[in-house]
Amino acid sequence: MTTPDFRTLGVPAPLVEILAADGKTTPTPIQADSLPDTLAGRDVLGRGRTGSGKTIAFALPMVARLGTVLAGGSRRAGRPLGLVLAPTRELVTQIARTIEPLAEAYGLKVTTIFGGINQKRQVEALRAGVDIVVAAPGRLEDLMQQGFVHLDAVEITVLDEADHMADLGFLPVVTRILDKTPRGGQRLLFSATLDNGVDKLVKRYLQNEVLHSVDEANSPVAAMTHHVYLTEDQDTKFELVKSLASGTGRRMLFMRTKHQAKKLAKKLTESGIPAVDLHGNLSQPQRDRNLAAFGDGSVRVMVATDVAARGVHVDEVELVVHVDPPVEHKAYLHRSGRTARAGNEGDVVTIALPSQLQDLKQLLRKAAITVTPKPATPASPEVVALVGDVAPYVKPAPRQAKPQGGGGTSQGANAQRKRARRTGGAEGGEPREGGRGRGGR
């Protein structure tokens, strides 16, 4: 059977041209299946694993319909026509990045709303008038309660990665938000699973919905190759990780904790393999900077925690390494879904110590992954083949010298602090530091 193109599926010519300019000419299965219904205004439940092309699947009908049949005339402050809800600020940003060039074809204005930054710019954008809002639930509800945004004019609502919303405990907030959207509007819900209350959202908010589920045989996940490498201890483990990170393609390495992610990124960089970290302790500018560096290829290695696994959508990640095996099988699938995206192939490696092997086998069984664990070192033929060409060594930037007499770890600095504590204040007239550590997320 001939695969339809975007034009024959009913996508307007201006949007087809924008997709083609970006190299997108052949729809993915979820796009080809759902577009005739979404473009016709039907409610749709889309089920498919990450990397299946869901963002384009809902961005096209939202822009096409708001730009033509649902064009609402003059823009009103704080009253968008289209709403996309997503669980993380990274995902919000990347969805908006996909929608914006399409929206420009019809003069539609897009803005993002998420926490972790000052709300001033977001409020200003809403007051100026906006057509499509892409938002994380928490900050959106805050701005709704403050009266800066109203959802009574929303024509199309999209809920992306609903299962991850449920995992993060967002469903009560999502429910309150959806209750504020008009009952007769079009609603599109995309989720990999229907557990943890997602099925209740479907029953409550979708009307006569059409189900479109990506066939596993056509799923990008089918293009993943899984490996489990056994290593004796933490030292041999780091050498193996360093080798796997040394290739020329993009790699994502996953850790369980923020501290370990930051530590590993630093160790790799000091070893001549530039790496960035992504976790909840970073400020928004730091997150944006690290994502941009990974996205544009200036840094090829990203070390992330599970929370970041859902928010990063970068194509051409050729290798995912579970440096720390995840706690449960859903996290394994979400992490692994960073590779084998958009029709590309990819490899997934899990590194396990002897004490972790039994739990890992149970996890893989629940994830329906069949793989035989093998002892491995950086010199193992399968590891060498997986690494491929090794990237050139990059000399680490020199560390900045710490100022004399302040904040260092020298004996003199320590003695100075001791004297300050005895006298009730710091030397040189500086106020004594309080007992509490820095707060914040």
Image (cartoon, grey):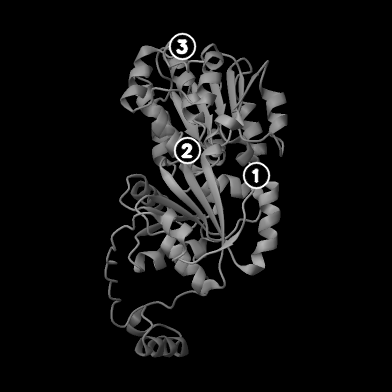
Query: Where is residue 341 drawn, in percent x and y?
Result: 47, 38
Q: Is residue 79 left or right of residue 372?
A: left
Question: Which of pointers 3 and 1 indicates the residue nearer the eye?
Answer: 3
CA separation in Å, label 2 and label 3: 25 Å
Marks 3,1: beta carbons within 8 A: no
Dot 2 crowding, Cα within 10 Å, few <14, some 14–19, many 20+: many
- Which of the marked residues, 2 or 1, is nearer the chain's N terminus? 1
Query: Where is residue 131 drawn, in percent x and y?
Result: 43, 23
Q: Amino acid at mark 3?
A: Gly
In the rendered view, would you say 124 is above or below 132?
below
Q: Which element is circle 2 on? A: loop
Q: Amino acid at mark 2?
A: Arg
Dot 3 crowding, Cα within 10 Å, few <14, some 14–19, many 20+: some
For disc 3, the marked residue is 10
For disc 1, the marked residue is 167
For disc 2, the marked residue is 341
In the rendered view, would you say 256 is above or below 158?
below
The residue drawn where x is 38% and y is 26% is 24
- Report the front residue among 45 and 362: 362
Dot 1 crowding, Cα within 10 Å, few <14, some 14–19, many 20+: few
Question: Which of pointers 2 and 1 indicates the residue nearer the eye?
Answer: 2
Q: Is residue 15 left or right of residue 90?
A: left
